[in-house]
Image (spheres, rainbow, N blue to C red):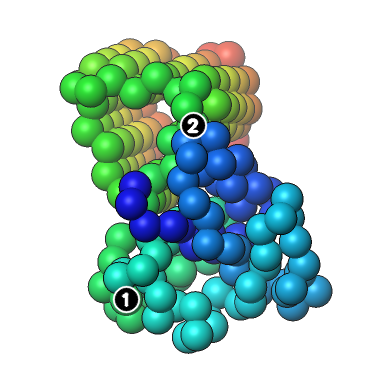
Amino acid sequence: MENPVLIFGATGLGLVALDIFQRNNVVVYGLLDDNTSLHNTEIDQYLVLGSTDDDGFLKLIGKKCEAFVAVEERSLRRNLVEMLNDRRHIMPVNAIHDTAVVSTLAEIGHGNLIAARAVVNVKASIGHHNLIQSGAIVDHGATIGDYVNIGAGSVIGSGVIVENDAFIGAGATLIAGVKIGQGASVGAGSVVVENVPAGGRVFGNPAQKV
């Protein structure tokens, strides 16, 4: 990445993203956060510059800076991405930890966070603005939509389809070939052996409707 990156979010996921970019020797211009108490404070020598809608900093994005949205709340993350699309006509970059293993034969979209020791195997397809947490495995031929959260240590089996806005809790296992519908939620530690409909919520081993 030639340009420095501006991180949207200065807590939690923002710190994870900051660590990833530091480890990848990417220059971080600064961070933006809507919590005004953080403004003009430093995080490991990086300054929280202002709010996420500050035009003075937004105008840098595109020509002089890249952007990464590091916000866990899905609706807020989507709003920030749409704002960047509409006002700056750009897509956020990916943040991929240097210990993650991402196959060169996998397809990766924009704005994804792939955390430490995660694995994205051959012919897997990752959409846009997903959170793939530490140690998660997306096996070969699996398809992940947009704005999906895959918890730490989860296993997404081969050929699994996870549609937009789904939530996969930490340590869950999705058996090969199952489909998780749009907006569905899989509880932490669950073992999913059959399809989950859109908006469905399942938990347990084997996972049952909640």
Residue 136 drawn at (x, y percent): 50, 23
Please name the residue that numbered disc 1 is placed on. Answer: 88
Q: Amino acid at mark 2?
A: His
Q: Amino acid at mark 1?
A: Arg
Confirm whether residue 28 shows in the render: yes
* Rendered view: 186 above or below 50: above
Confirm whether residue 185 shows in the render: no
Q: Nearer the viewer, residue 128 or 158?
A: 128
Q: Nearer the viewer, residue 16 or 209?
A: 16
* Rendered view: 85 above or below 14: below
Quadrant of the rendered structure where residue 42 is? bottom right
* Rendered view: 145 above or below 142: below
Q: CA distance from mark 1 to mark 2?
A: 26 Å
Q: Nearer the viewer, residue 54 or 187?
A: 54
Which residue is at a point 74% across and 73% down the rendered structure image? 40
Quadrant of the rendered structure where residue 120 is? top left
Quadrant of the rendered structure where residue 177 is? top left
Residue 59 tag number: none
- Circle 2: element type: loop
**Which one is earlier in the sequence, the residue at label 1 or at label 2?**
1
Which residue is at a point 71% across and 55% down the rendered structure image? 45
Binning the other alpha carbons within 10 Å of mark 1 as few (below 14), some (14 to 19) or many (20 upward) gives some
- Circle 1: element type: helix
Residue 97 tag number: 2
Binning the other alpha carbons within 10 Å of mark 2 as few (below 14), some (14 to 19) or many (20 upward) gives many
Residue 41 drawn at (x, y percent): 77, 67
